[in-house]
Image: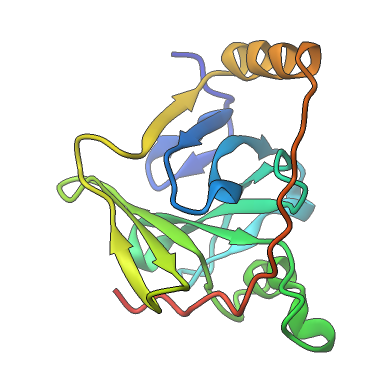
């Protein structure tokens, strides 16, 4: 598996992308692509900077970032229109290490589970381990193939339901 050199998450090389499907909120589904530019890195609670992954498929940019203290990836919208002023830019708050919001997160082994916040029920929902969320780390070549396939079948439908405040992750 050929991962880009120089990008680490913990002791592991960072994949070029992730493909995710099966969330209750379909805006979280899609292709998340590694942003190599340092501007797009986030500072975690350990003081280190980590690359982020971005999904622009659903009309509202979502990003996935590493939470070092919790040993997991979290997915968050770039902005929250329900917040005022600079607090609405969630990416800048995560990048600066101010807060770690999210709508979903992946707890790796031994748990191997995805959690997603359900706004209707106002609680975190645990997706079953062996099915429901389809999750794949992608090489640079696989990311390129998916982008080409997406461009050739360019039919985008965007459902822009208003996002309420992403909950703090207390799990």
Q: Position of residue 136 (x, y in %)?
A: 42, 27
The residue at 42%/67% (across/down) is 117
Residue at position x 52%, y 73% from top? 100
Q: Is residue 112 above or below residue 97?
A: above
Residue at the far right: name it. Answer: 85
Q: What is the quadrant of residue 143 in the picture?
A: top right
Q: Which colour scheme appears in the figure?
A: rainbow
Q: Position of residue 141 (x, y in %)?
A: 61, 11
Given residues 122 and 55, the one toward you in this image is 122
Nearest the camera: 75 or 70?
A: 75
Count the marks: how many? 0
Would you place residue 97 above or below residue 66 in this image?
below
- Foreground residue among 100 and 79: 79
- Give me the residue at 70% from left, 44% from top: 58
Which image quarter holds the N terminus? top left
- List x then y, in percent, for residue 37: 77, 43
Task: Say above or below: 114 vs 117.
Answer: above
Residue lying at 79% horizontally and 54% vertically, measured from the top left: 39
Residue 160 sits in which quadrant? bottom right
In the image, taking residue 146 as reference, residue 135 lies left or right, namely left
Question: Is 140 left or right of 137, judged from the image as shown?
Answer: right
Q: State the residue lying farthest toward the left.
A: 110
Q: Quadrant of residue 142?
A: top right
Query: Residue 171 placed where, x, y %?
Result: 29, 73
């Amino acid at each position: 598996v050929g991962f880009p050199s120089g990008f680490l998450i913990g002791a592991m090389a960072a994949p070029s992308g992730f493909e995710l499907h099966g969330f209750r909120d379909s805006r979280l589904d899609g292709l998340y692509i590694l942003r190599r530019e340092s501007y797009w890195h986030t500072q975690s609670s350990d003081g280190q900077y980590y690359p982020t992954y971005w999904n622009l498929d659903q009309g509202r940019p979502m990003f996935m970032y590493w939470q070092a203290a919790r040993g997991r990836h979290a997915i968050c919208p770039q902005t929250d229109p329900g917040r005022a002023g600079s607090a609405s830019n969630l990416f800048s708050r995560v990048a600066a290490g101010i807060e770690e919001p999210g709508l979903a997160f992946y707890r790796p082994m031994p748990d191997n589970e995805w959690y997603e916040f359900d706004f209707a029920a106002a609680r975190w929902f645990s997706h079953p381990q062996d099915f429901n969320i389809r999750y794949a780390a992608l090489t640079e070549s696989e990311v390129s193939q998916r982008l080409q396939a997406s461009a050739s079948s360019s039919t985008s439908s965007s459902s822009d339901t208003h996002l309420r405040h992403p909950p703090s992750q207390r799990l």
